[in-house]
Amino acid sequence: MERTLAIIKPDAVERRLAGPIIQRIEDAGFGIRAMRRVHLSKKDAEGFYAVHRARPFFASLTRFMSSGPAVVLVLEAPDAIKKWRTLMGATDPAKADAGTLRKEFAQSIERNATHGSDAPETAAYEIGYFFSGLELI
Ligand code: ATP
Ligand code: MG
């Protein structure tokens, strides 16, 4: 079993897509080990996306991620990191495969509905950023 950190981003929460996305998560067979609604501060978003701080889109991305409530979840499945990224689809919805969440729900490369950890080390960092061991059941 593997765990990954998923976020239903503010664009999707604002458009009342949290329900449909959670349904897709459950339909795909993930276990939801933890879940919370959070409104990140700009500083919280900067800490979360620290690896991207040199990128040209960093200021805009962190403004967007702190623009409204998001839903953070810990998902569990065999090969969860890859499985969740496959279900999300490509970062840019224009390049995402049919049937993926970003193809269906994303508005742009920035407002792309969901986040997923990209490796075991980032999953461990990102899960710990939002959840304590006590909250992970
Ligand atoms: P995430 O980390 O959110 O799961 P990802 O791993 O597919 O997405 P990253 O390269 O890690 O993509 O980029 C992090 C986030 O930054 C993207 O999900 C998107 O919201 C935003 N982003 C990435 N590239 C661009 C870009 N060229 N212009 C604007 N925003 C971007
Ligand atoms: Mg990423």
Image: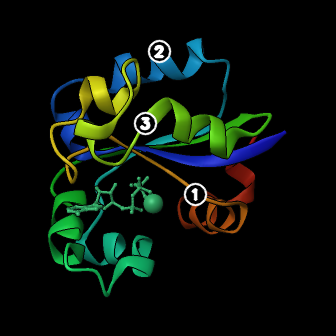
Q: Mark 3 near mark 1, Cβ–Cβ under 8 Å?
A: no
What is the spatial separation of the Cα atoms under label 3 and label 1, in whole angstroms?
A: 13 Å
User: What x and y, as percent, mark residue 5?
Assistant: 57, 50
Circle 1 residues within 10 Å: few <14, some 14–19, many ≥20: some
Amino acid type indicated by mark 3? Gly
Is residue 18 rendered to the left or right of residue 79? Answer: left
Q: Which residue is mark 3?
A: 89
Give the mark, 3 or 1, whose residue is nearer the N terminus.
3
Secondary structure of residue under mark 3: loop
Q: Which residue is mark 2?
A: 23
What residue sits 40% from the left and 23% below the top? 21
What residue sits 25% from the left and 59% below the top? 65
User: What x and y, as percent, mark residue 118?
Assistant: 58, 57
Secondary structure of residue under mark 1: loop
Give the mark, 3 or 2, whose residue is nearer the N terminus.
2
Q: Residue furthest bottom?
A: 54
What is the spatial separation of the Cα atoms under label 3 and label 2, in whole angstroms?
A: 17 Å
Amino acid type indicated by mark 2? Gln
What residue sits 32% from the left and 33% below the top? 102
What residue sits 26% from the left and 68% below the top? 41
Q: Which residue is mark 1?
A: 118
Q: Is label 3's Cβ within 8 Å of ligand 1?
A: no
